[in-house]
Amino acid sequence: MQVFLYILKRILQSIPLLIIVSLISFFIIRLSPVDPLAELKLNPSVSKETLQKETERLGLDKPIIVQYGKWAKSFVKGDLGITSNGEQVSTKLKERIPNTLLLAVVVIFMTWIVGVPLGVIAALKWKSPVDRILTVLTSIGMAIPSFFFAVLLLLFAVKTGWFPVGGLTSSNFAEMSLGGKIWDIAHHLVLPVTVLFTISLAGLQRQMRANLLDVLDSDYVKFAKAKGLSEFKVVYKHALRNAINPMITLLGFEFAGLLSGAALTEYVFQYPGLGRLILEAVLRSDINLVMASLMMGAIMLIAGNLIADILLIITDPRIRVKGGVS
């Protein structure tokens, strides 16, 4: 019950953040000189009635604060409007959000499966050739810009033909068996996952190494060794548990970083994700699509941080005691 109340409290605390994000985004977009319905007006398939409806819904003939109020009211009701192409914004989001979540979940899973063990190995082999090699590799990973790395992999894929260079599925995806569909999606994910995994792995592995080295130098670990406990128990039962808690806190920030960093990667590989959708919407000054996409992105970031907080409560009893959560 206490955990449920804690989650509810965090959700309520996120509401002012969402309002601030929406205010900043809306005013920046609307203060630009570009007509938010310019491309919609140029689309011959969009009727005058639809244009009039959008003008009234957004209140474009009223002061900007009234326009924000109208947009916020429509957003809360679930009326996200239409894109500059005449499509429903909600339909576009339903298509893109699962793709971005799939990419983020795969990258985070692989990063933690590989990064945490490598960080532990580097800490236990401190100043050894293994530690130095891992440090050099992670430094290279942190130094490579994601956009540049994505372009290099794209050129590699075009030259070799080993990997698809766009989209999430092949043209004959609907005709494939279940196993074939899974393989096809996995094949399309290889390049964008490789880019984001390489960048994320470097930071996570170095952080894990630093945390474990700090814990191994603490008094209680030295005392455990003095009592005659085995190296395995000292490291994996005592030190590792305390070293990994700060990593869980970083999980929410890692999720946020993936969503922002994935935008350029998605754009390079033409991956149908939320980041690419936002970039394209900004270039077209599509106010409905930009605002809805930004808000969905903010909600996903808040959800990632909330998951990290819940995991931290589960793994660290001290936080449960301090916060009155049981």
Image (tube, rainbow, N blue to C red):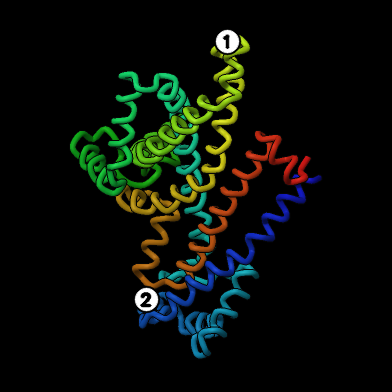
Looking at the rendering, which quadrant does residue 138 occupy? top left
Q: Nearer the viewer, residue 97 or 13?
A: 13
Front-most of residues 111 and 139: 139
Other residues around mark 1 within 10 Å, as few (<14) / some (14–19) / many (≥20): few
Q: Residue at x 36, y 47 (%)?
A: 167
Outermost residue to the right: 1
- The answer to whether any part of residue 180 appears in the image is no
Against 316, is 237 above or below? above
Q: Residue at x 38, y 56 (%)?
A: 276
Give the left or right position of residue 297, taking residue 36 as reference: right
Q: Front-most of 84 and 309?
A: 309
Determine which residue is flagged by label 1.
230
Disc 2 residue crowd, few under 14, some 14–19, many 20+, Cα 10 Å: some
Q: Quadrant of the N terminus?
A: top right
Question: Considering only vertical position in the picture, is 317 above or below 262?
Answer: above
Quarter that holds the C terminus: top right
| Residue located at (26% from left, 32% from top) | 162
Q: Amino acid at mark 2?
A: Glu
Kindly report which numbered mark, 2 or 1, lies closer to the viewer in this rendering. 1
Answer above or below: position of 80 versus 47: above
Residue 188 visible to an observer of this rendering: yes
**Which one is in front, 63 or 179?**
63
Percent across and percent down for residue 183 are 42, 31
Q: Position of residue 280 (x, y in %)?
A: 36, 63
Residue 316 in the figure: left or right of residue 260:
right
- Label 2 secondary element: helix
Q: Of the residues shown, which amino acid type is indicated by label 1?
A: Ser
Q: Position of residue 92 (x, y in %)?
A: 48, 60
Rendering quarter of residue 307? top right
Residue that carries the numbered disc 2 in the rendered image: 39
Residue at (59% x, 43% y) in the render = 308
Closer to the N terminus: mark 2 or mark 1?
A: 2
